[in-house]
Amino acid sequence: MAEEGAADRRADILVVGSVALDTVETPFGKAEEVVGGSAVYFGAAASLFGRVQLVGVVGDDYPLDRLAFLHERGADLSGLEVAEGRSFRWSGVYEYDLNARRTLSTELGVFADFEPTVPASFRTARWIFLGNIDPALQLRVLDQVDEPRLVACDTMNYWIERDRDALLELLGRIDMLVINDAEARELSEDHNLARAARWILERGPRHVVIKKGEHGAVLFHEDGVFFVPGFPLEEIFDPTGAGDAFAGGLLGQLARADSLREAELRRAVVFGCALGSFACEAFGPGRLGDLSLHEVGARVQSFLEMTRFEHEMPARA
Ligand code: AMP
């Protein structure tokens, strides 16, 4: 958290995405109209690492006080417009296989007519996350920023099916696509993830990170492939927002390290998996809101222990 009164010297991380009211049902409970959306989950995670600058819109029915935890972490919400009308609402249900989510409804509300304006003080942000939202809006945000070091982007089936052309244009303008396995298959029209990743890399981004829910994530780029498992949580309440929290941990750690070296990219994917796992521990972004960097570091350490092993190549017979 930014210290009261002290200048916050952390890197600026700009995010545009949905700011939502979510209604979610899992085998373990139900939550109605909790604050959520890609920008909120991303911001909740990334604000542990840097100064989040959020661009989005809510309707005049939105409980803004429930975003106070973002302010407390030093996030700048001056790019969050309050428009007349209803806020974005999403509802979904998870069956026992928590990797399979069914969307029950998506109400765009004020997002339908949203024209994003990036405040002047946000335009120099070097780390940018185009969270899941209409790709046309993601493109318009990109037109308003100066010289970012890294532009990462997420999307989902809803947009792949409705605005594929804008998405393909976007691929040519970003550095990293962070996407889940089902979406990578749908976008590339190929069931094989290694080929799907190559298909995406051929369309522009230098890095593709494929999220595999409870099975972790895979980074594909020209330096090769890097796998991280999912953290073996014994209790999962709600996986909503895990993908965005993953992206927040990933970009946050890169911004904090101020580096895109291979070793830092790998470490950042582990931070992503750690943040994604914390997101599942409660309904809504609450667990991310009260998380400390120390707890995150301890979970990253346990990833190291979970995956370390010894091996010697057997001598040739
Ligand atoms: P994740 O579980 O990380 O994929 O993200 C879940 C969040 O995405 C929820 O908080 C929803 O409000 C938000 N969401 C769901 N559908 C959409 C959509 N079509 N566009 C933007 N955000 C969405």
Image: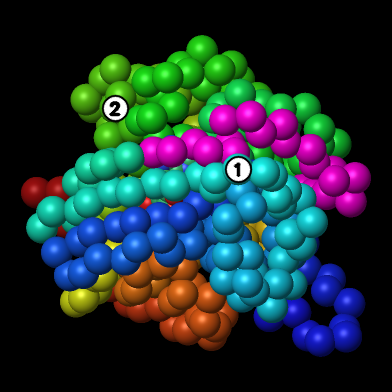
Amino acid type for the residue under numbered disc 2: Arg
Q: Is mark 2 within 8 Å of ligand 1?
A: no
Magenta stretch bounds: 106-126
Q: Are marks 2 and 1 in contact (CB under 8 Å)?
A: no
Would residue 7 appear left or right of 118 to someone viewing this image? Answer: right
Q: Is residue 259 left or right of residue 263?
A: right
Residue 35 lies, in percent from the top left, at 49, 62
Name which residue lies at 44% across and 47% down.
89
Q: What's the amino acid at mark 1?
A: Gly
Q: In the rendered view, would you say 140 is above or below 36?
A: above
Location of residue 73 in the rendering, given as x and y in whole percent from the top left corner? 68, 75
Whole-Å distance between the Cαs marked 2 and 1?
35 Å
Residue 236 placed where, x, y %? 24, 70
Instruction: Provide residue 182's location: percent of width, then percent of height.
Output: 27, 35
Question: Dot 2, crowdedness within 10 Å: few (<14), some or many (≥20)?
Answer: some
Please say whether residue 156 is visible from this viewpoint. yes
Q: Residue at x 69, y 78 (%)?
A: 72
- Which residue lies under the disc numbered 1? 85
